[in-house]
Image (cartoon, rainbow, N blue to C red):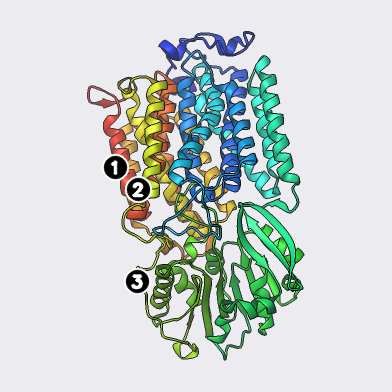
Amino acid sequence: MTDADQEPTANTGGDAAAATTSERPGRMWLRRRTDEAPEKPDYRVVRRLVLGSALMLFLELALIRWLGANVVHLSYFSNFVLLGSFLGIGLGFLIARHRWSVLPAAPIILAALVILVFLEPVTIDRAGDDVIYFTSLHTSGPPAWAVLPVIFVLVAACLAGPAEAVGRCFPHLRPLTAYRWDLVGSLIGILSFTAMSFLRAPSVVWGIVVTIGFVLLIDGWKRWLSAACGLAMVAFLLVETLAPGISWSPYYKVHTEDRVLADAPITDISVNGVPHQIMRPAQVRLAEEAQYGLPYQRSPQNPLRNVLIIGAGSGSDVAIALSKGAQHVDAVDIDPRIMEIGVEKNPDHPYADPRVTRYVNDGRAFLETTDNKYDLILFALPDSLALVTGASQIRLESFLFTEQALTDARQHLTDDGMFAMYNYYREDWLIDRLAGTAAAAFDHTPCVDKVGGGQAVVSAALNESNQSCGEAWVPAGAVIAPATDDRPFLYYQGGSIPAIYLWTLGGILLISLIAVRALGGPFRAMRPYADLFFMGAAFLLLETKNIATFALLFGTTWVVNAMVFAGVLVIVLAAVETTRRFRTPPLPLVFVGIAASLAVCYFVEPDWLLTLPFWPRLIVAVLLAFIPIYLANVAFSKRFGASDDSRAAFGLNLLGAMLGGTMEYLALLTGYRNLLLIVAALYLCAFLLAPRKGLVTV
């Protein structure tokens, strides 16, 4: 069956079919009015569409990384940058229906945003104790609910430009052909940024790529203005890149500074503008900071034949373990750059010791894959200042502190073994919660040492007789139930959704409604694509659930995250190609398949998969995650292919995805598993709102 058999003609009307006058007159392929897209695509249009889509994804990821690194504490709220991207892309498609253009303004807005943030650093005040944000800074900046909507709007404005360029290409291609090439461009964008993360390319390289993209998209004298703005932005990014002590890891902008204190060499490590680690000699640290020696005092007869340190970082905890007589140490940290700094600058040179083996991995993932037994397992200050991309509440260490994770740690202890974790926990309720989690995992009361300033050490031996506690643990108040793999929100005290999120989300939704009404016209006119709006919301929530599941099963590393995003795009592309090339079942049957696959996902708990070896676990996880996505995108492709106005349809779908991104915060109340019930309800709404001719769904 040919494309012509499957893809309806892309008929457009009104503004959607109007000739665009914002482009250079010579580009007649963008200026003509078309009542019917040709069967054979114009590859000049395809090239422009792919370039615009690639630039959209690349710019989105670059803004998430760069703004999170330079707006202090924004990395805890990076999901709002993602939401701004969705709004900007959706608005860009709506703008593409008009004669005027926002594309030439996008590089100006982007350059202004980068230069202003660079010259006038912004600090978000994240005050409040309902959610804990690890930082040693005493911030006095504006509250998150005031800063985040501003960043949201600016990000949306930057993304609207390339999205408009893509949207203007859609009427010149059949809907599914346009969608196919949009996905190809998106894959190019995400793979390009992933490659740069792998190579640890600095921000100036990102700026050069984005500038080239805008220059290629914009015509006429405005191209020179775009180039000038890009060069100004790149100049500031070059200053940042060449600043002493600056480097980039896959997660952070890292800054190191060497100094001497009391004749002892010290290296301060800051990430994303926040003090993160201090490298100093092990003996100095043991003498001045009691928490580092307490795990060894609570297990005085421990032979320390084999030690595991998760959160090894720059090596200070490894050096202390070696000084205590450890015969072998497995040092695990998720950030390769932090470990490299430890290799280069730690005064004790622990990573040069032949007794130490380094692993760059997620701590939970390492526990799930190793068969080794340990005399001591340390969770050594594994607190991150970043979220897993695409998940509003999953930090890099979230799955390390669940009851299931501590149970797994217990199973890796020898008979003489001891587990311990320490940090600057800030709040008594968090210390008590971790102690309660250890008690649940080890079936006895742990040792709890509070050493002041919110610092604490929680220690538990496999056999209670092997632990030597000081004072008995007395909780400061009611002990909050342990975090679980379904609700890995360790730093969330519970109750309702925190006000910091509600106020910010409310402001963002209000801004979005006003923008959509202003650019898209009356909401009544968008009614024919209401089902696509709900499909977008459901798809984003489904993607969020899958990100959480893969982070649990395979780790929260940037590699796993990038593979999930790329995998989703590949599956969506496969669904589009299936719909283009083959006769697919009618929509009601496809929706039945979506419901059945969601039901299977709901009843197969991810914890069951953790018992499987790696390859069977991967195969089952991929099938469970991607079959619903595949079927959902077959349904979307069938509806999108039948749309009369592909730009409005696609724009509404993206705006629905933005709604899904705000609904993700419901996971704080429901857990990730129950998000599937909301996904099912949203797909039911989409099915009920799909246009019909008589009793037949179109």
Element type where label 2 sits in the image: helix
Dot 3 crowding, Cα within 10 Å, few <14, some 14–19, many 20+: some
In the image, what residue type sits under mark 3?
Val
Which residue corresponds to the image point at 37% horizontal and 44% vertical from the top-left?
A: 503
The dot on residue 479 is: 3
N-terminal label among 3 and 2: 3
N-terminal label among 1 and 3: 3
Between tags 1 and 3, which lies in front? 3
The vertical placement of 410 against 252, above or below, is: below
Tell me the CA gap for discs 3 and 2: 35 Å
The dot on residue 431 is: none
N-terminal label among 1 and 2: 2
Residue closest to the eye, 78 or 29: 78
The dot on residue 598 is: 2
Between tags 3 and 2, which lies in front? 3
The vertical placement of 471 against 422, above or below, is: below
Residue closest to the eye, 104 or 359: 104
- Judge left or right: residue 475 versus residue 144: left
Where does residue 480 sit, x and y in percent of width and height? 35, 68
Which residue corresponds to the image point at 51% horizontal and 38% vertical from the top-left?
A: 151
In the image, what residue type sits under mark 2?
Leu
Residue 143 in view of the camera: yes
Which residue corresponds to the image point at 58% horizontal and 79% vertical from the top-left?
A: 290
Where does residue 16 sit, x and y in percent of width and height? 44, 15
